[in-house]
Amino acid sequence: MDSPDLGLFGPGSVSWRLHQDRSAFVGGLRALLLQALSTRSMRAVVDFSDYRSDPWGRFFRTSDFIMTVTFAPRERALAAIEHVRHVHERISGFDPDSGQPYAAGDPELLAFIHNCFVDSILAAHEALVHPLSKSDADRYLAEQAEVALRLGARQDALATTKEELLPLIEGVGDLGISDGARRAFSDISHPRFGDLAPLLGPLWHLLFETALDLLPPFALELYGLDPWRPLSPLRRASTAGLAQAARLLLPSHPYVRRAKYAWYADPESLRTPAAGG
């Protein structure tokens, strides 16, 4: 019997454990807020993205990419990465805020975007679920670096340890609060929910404020917020409880279910449990 195709990482990976957890949603919000502080990155979004006219479409496409790369069969994961590479090739221009040209495929910019993402996923998991060992955190970075390198990121600009992440992020030369970043902050903090606003608005506010709590001081200061804003214990407990309820009540992403079914159907699964149970 052939072994099942369990994608780029497999059930014993830290990537499976972290990306399937509901805390990753808060990590995603934090990552967006950090990434928006690169003026070149934000200019590319303003010039080429439809995030303002279709914010939920953009959000779900990004989420689907992450879940595809993490849990889909290897060929499909690699095809998703190659598709994004081709999209990046068409995105370039000039950023008047930094006075520099930009290109979505710039290896340094790709490394910055990647570092913001993995740092945010780690921060959310450790705040809302439990701390990771140094070996698990570094293994997660090594796993995710494979994706970043396939996308074209510069290898020496990728963090290999958790301690390297924030210095690399903060050391990017074009950080600043552009008009695009201000609009992104406003759009992320107050998205459009339509008729569901009375129900979803308070829940979103909780998640967004928790993401702010987890931002590093330099990012809070650029957004004009208290750079030493503490993580509210009540907010942390409420968000952790909401994530736990989501784990129990909401179905997993289809790729997560497919990957776990494939793993559990294989006799070898009896020897090594899938990440997250």
Image (cartoon, grey):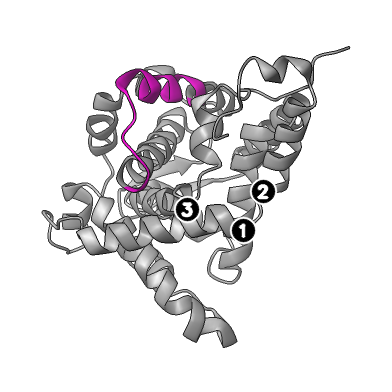
Placement of 134 over or under 125, stated as above or below: above
Percent coordinates x, y for residue 156 in the rendering: 37, 17
Number of the label disc, if any, that sits on residue 250? 1
Residue of label 2: 253
As measured in the structure, the alpha-carbon distance from the residue carrying label 2 to the one carrying label 3 is 13 Å
Task: Say whether residue 6 is left or right of residue 118.
Answer: right
Please provide the residue range marked out in magenta: 128-144
Quadrant hosting residue 185: bottom left
Most extreme residue toward the right is: 1
Q: Amino acid at mark 3?
A: Phe
Q: Is residue 129 magenta?
A: yes
Considering the numbered disc 1 on the image, is that residue within a helix, a strand or a loop? Answer: loop
**Would you name the residue on which mark 3 appears?**
25
Between marks 2 and 1, how big is the CA–CA gap? 9 Å
The CA distance from mark 1 to mark 3 is 13 Å
- Vertical relation: 49 (above or below) 132: below
Amino acid type assigned to the residue bearing label 1 in the image? Leu
Q: Which of labels 2 and 1 is toward the front?
A: 1
Side of 169 relative to 59 (left or right): left
Few, some or many residues within 10 Å of mark 3 (<14, 14–19, 20+): many
Give me the disc on residue 98. Answer: none
Residue at 36%, 52% (x, y): give it: 30
Left or right, 255 with reference to 106: right
Where's residue 209, x and y in %? Answer: 30, 64
Q: Work out whether mark 2 precedes mark 3 in sequence or the reverse, and give the earlier one.
A: 3
